[in-house]
Image (spheres, grey):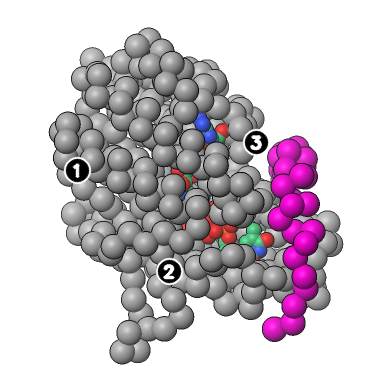
Amino acid sequence: MSQTILIVGGAGFIGSNFVHHIASQYPNYKIVVLDALTYAGNLENLEFVKDKIIFIKGNIADMNAVSSVFQEYSPQYIVNFAAETHVDRSIVGPQIFLETNVKGTQNLLEACRKMEIKRYLQVSTDEVYGDLGDHFLNDAPQYFTENTPLSPNCPYAASKASADLFVRSYFETYSLPVLITRCTNNYGPYQYPEKLIPFFLFRAMQNQSLPIYGDGKNVRDWLYVKDHCEAIDRVLHHGKIGEVYNIGGHNEKTNLQITEILLEKLGKPKSLITFVEDRLAHDRRYAMDPTKMREQLGWEPRYPFEKWIDETISWYMEHQEWVDRCAKRSEEFRKQNYDQRKEETH
Ligand code: NAD
Ligand code: DAU
């Protein structure tokens, strides 16, 4: 019998890449996408698969909208990407993060509880673990494992950690068949141009300054989005119910390194770099230990950074109109976030 998969938040960056992945790998699945189409959601991202999916516009914070999708399609698999995802927006206005990320997740769990589902997968983030800081313990680098205590620092991370705890509680209390994945920073096509890589590409292509927060030495662990999608697929179909899986590729770079790579590849001068006032509660370093994914599920990253950052840059250069259309939707936020930041020297 054919399976129905409900991909929630499937019109955003990672969600739309995952819809492409499922459509190509599981041609027999019925794919239902539920997405509110916020500023970050975009039907253009699903253009290539539009004949292979059923798209429903709906807000997960609205229980009636969620219930009607579950009643109509009775999905066996549910993957939840839907979230407010930008840390800076969570600092400017945290309320919507509580509504979408926490209440929205709990609505999905409640809908699942009323149905016979096979698996619910919550797409979470390394940010729930907090900050690894600057210092290595006894000179050895530290990594987040699945047992690292949750210690979120910004409202976005707090909302994602709260959602994870609700997911866990539905497993412990109601034996709901849930899984949680926590991934590092993704890069690739269809990322909304307010996140570091597409935002700086967008600015550099127009010879505008690149505002690096603080000293630019914060470290992120960058993974190509297709690697993330393959990892989610592996956990969804083969992961152990009730468990958490950390996803990462040991590809740590400072923000300054990323910026210099982008400028060099675009042939733009380093003089575009400006250091500006730091992000509040700016975590210094994230880095994952993905041993469990490798040893238990045989997953490893397949897309090396050196090649796929080039592919990513080419994609953004070829899709400048897509980028411009997205960027227009967040002019007000850009003013709120950047206009007051003082320049600094480092
Ligand atoms: P995104 O901001 O690009 O997309 C989010 C999607 O969710 C959009 O399509 C949006 O319309 C939809 N959405 C937002 N609020 C909704 C609501 N109330 N109801 C229904 N749909 C709603 O996000 P992304 O970067 O693709 O991240 C997807 C998921 O992966 C998030 O849960 C995020 O926390 C997690 N994650 C992201 C990264 C990353 O580097 N981008 C890394 C690890 C984990
Ligand atoms: O780690 C996973 C997380 O990665 C996801 O859970 C989030 O949804 C996703 O947005 C991302 O969060 P970050 O805060 O790490 O990503 P962002 O692209 O916003 O910033 C990356 C780094 O670059 C961070 O240290 C802040 C810095 N930065 C960002 C912007 C937008 C700047 O210095 N200047 C900027 O203008």
Q: Residue at coordinates 46% horizontally, 80% vertically from top-left?
A: 134
**If you read the primary sequence from the N terminus, does the residue marked by circle 1 or circle 2 appear first?**
2
The x, y position of residue 47, in whole percent, is 60, 27
Kind of residue at badge 2: Asp
Q: Nearer the viewer, residue 194 or 278?
A: 278
Q: Which mark is residue 304?
A: none
Residue 274 at what x, y percent from top left? 76, 72
Per the image, the residue denoted by label 1 is 242
Where is 120 relative to 66, above or below?
below
Real-space Cα separation, disc 1 to disc 2, in angstroms: 25 Å
Question: Which mark's residue is nearer the viewer, 2 or 3?
Answer: 2
Q: Which residues are magenta?
A: 319-346
The type of residue carrying mark 3 is: Tyr
On the rendered image, what quadrant is the C terminus found in? Answer: bottom right
Q: Residues within 10 Å of mark 1 (few under 14, many from 20)?
A: many
Q: Quadrant of the N terminus?
A: top left
* Residue 288 higher or lower than 37, as above or below: below
Callout 2: SS: loop
Relative horizontal placement of residue 239, taking residue 63 as reference (left or right): left
**Vertical side of 1 occupied by 313: above or below:** below
Real-space Cα distance between discs 1 and 3?
32 Å
Give the structural element (helix, strand or loop) at label 3: loop
Q: Position of residue 197 (x, y in %)?
A: 63, 58
Residue located beneath label 2 in the image: 131
Residue occupying image coordinates x 47% and y 28%: 61
Residue that extends furthest to the top in the rendered view of this protein: 72
Q: Note whether ligand 1 is within 8 Å of mark 3.
A: yes
**Secondary structure mainly formed by the magenta segment:** helix
Q: What is the residue that sits farthest to the front in this orientation?
A: 95
Position of 316 with respect to 143 (left or right) is right
Residue linked to disc 3: 39
